[in-house]
Image (cartoon, helix red, strand yellow):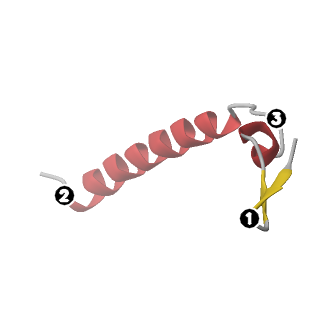
Amino acid sequence: MAHTEDGKTVLNAQEARGGKELGVMRYVLHISLALSVIAGIVIYSIFFRG
């Protein structure tokens, strides 16, 4: 529970988080990383065809 300490409101970790921990950002990170790797390969193959 929130309490005041030295004129400041102190929250525990769950209250400060303010929501559920869904793990959705992990999927966003993996998808964006994969898309950036694919984009890099495509750009490399277009500009540096050997």
Give whichever of discs 1 and 3 has the lower sequence position.
1
Examine the rendered structure and indicate whether residue 7 appears above or below residue 44: below
In the visual, does 42 lie left or right of 25?
left
Image depth: mark 3 or mark 2 in front? 3
* Residue closer to the observer: 6 or 37: 6
* Residue closer to the observer: 20 or 50: 20
Residue that label 2 marks: 48
Furthest residue to the left?
50
Q: Residue 44: x, y in percent?
A: 26, 54
* Residue closer to the observer: 40 or 3: 3
Give whichever of discs 2 and 1 has the lower sequence position.
1
Q: In the drawing, what numbered circle is on residue 20?
A: 3
User: Three-letter amino acid code at disc 2?
Assistant: Phe
Image depth: mark 2 or mark 1 in front? 1
Residue that label 1 marks: 6
Furthest residue to the top?
22
